[in-house]
């Protein structure tokens, strides 16, 4: 009788401690809500919190790939978070929910990110890919209208307060921006990034979009080869 292979899922969905420490101030809640980000929304029970993070489930040194998307879309219909949870508990709730969306391929966005991960590490279980990957946002909150414009001052505050500090922890990882908004919002940070097509519609449907994602895998493989002295 052949052994049964069980589906392994992490028991803790928080990222490694170093990345978590960067994000936790966003759930105090973030001071930006009462200053420069007054147009953004903090309504946990309706899903409106800084969100969209997933991965880095092992040690910081295991992270080989950072995927930066523009901002989270509108919350899903039943997406809701506790309004009384601590910052750490709330971040854990969010990371658990986002992990489930990527694992199940909830929509085209999640399926397309999975496609990039499978290009980088074919045949590797998703849980293991999530030890090697950190998925994050250039701006942590949803636009007033999904896919709409967010004030440049908000984008810059968010990138300077959160994204730059995340990237500083991962100097050896491949960093890819997914779509034009994520690319433009990170330029002033002056990190070496790979700009590829968006993973959400409509950008993911443009000619050459999927081919551009191959560039991410090539860079990850090249960096791995260098580290191993191949």
Image: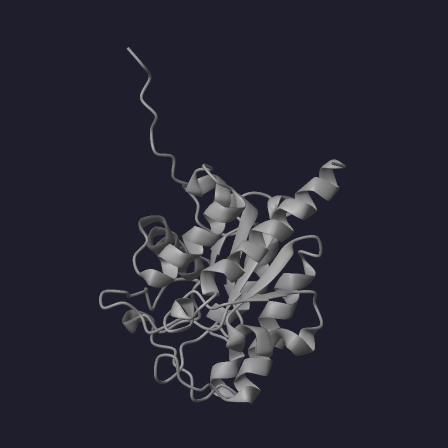
Above or below, 121 against 155 in this view is above
Residue placed at 39% from the left, 52% from the top? Answer: 99
Which quadrant is the N terminus positioned in?
top left
Residue placed at 34% from the left, 84% from the top? Answer: 145
Closer to us: 219 or 45: 219
Q: Residue furthest top?
A: 1
Figure colour scheme: one colour
Residue placed at 56% from the left, 88% from the top? Answer: 153
Image coords of residue 22 (percent x, y): 59, 63
Image coords of residue 58 (percent x, y): 55, 43
Could one spot residue 64 in this view of the protein?
A: no
Closer to us: 171 or 109: 109
Image coords of residue 210 (percent x, y): 46, 60
Closer to us: 95 or 176: 176
Could one spot residue 33 in this view of the protein?
A: yes
Toward which corner of the image does residue 50 lie, by quadrant? bottom left
Q: Residue furthest right?
A: 229
Image coords of residue 140 (percent x, y): 48, 72
Which quadrant is the C terminus positioned in?
top right
Closer to us: 12 or 198: 198
Above or below, 174 against 196 in this view is above
């Amino acid at each position: 009788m052949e052994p049964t292979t069980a589906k392994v899922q992490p028991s803790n969905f928080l990222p490694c401690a170093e990345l978590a420490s960067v994000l936790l101030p966003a759930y105090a809640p973030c001071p930006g809500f009462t200053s420069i980000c007054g147009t953004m929304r903090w309504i946990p029970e309706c899903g409106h919190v800084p969100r969209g993070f997933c991965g880095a489930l092992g040690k910081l040194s295991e992270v080989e790939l950072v995927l930066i998307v523009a901002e989270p879309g509108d919350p899903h219909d039943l997406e809701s978070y506790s309004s009384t949870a601590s910052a750490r508990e709330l971040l854990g709730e969010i990371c658990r929910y986002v992990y489930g969306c990527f694992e199940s391929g909830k929509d085209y966005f999640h399926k397309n990110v999975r496609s990039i991960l499978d290009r980088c590490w074919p045949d590797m279980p998703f849980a293991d890919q999530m030890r090697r990957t950190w998925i994050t946002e250039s701006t942590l909150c949803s636009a007033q209208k999904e896919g709409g414009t967010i004030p440049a001052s908000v984008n810059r505050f968010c990138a300077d307060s959160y994204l730059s500090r995340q990237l500083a922890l991962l100097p050896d990882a491949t960093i890819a921006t997914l779509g034009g908004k994520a690319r433009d919002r990170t330029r002033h940070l002056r990190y070496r990034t790979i700009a590829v097509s968006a993973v959400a519609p409509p950008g993911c449907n443009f000619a050459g979009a999927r081919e551009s994602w191959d560039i991410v895998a090539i860079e990850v493989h090249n960096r791995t080869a260098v580290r191993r002295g191949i």
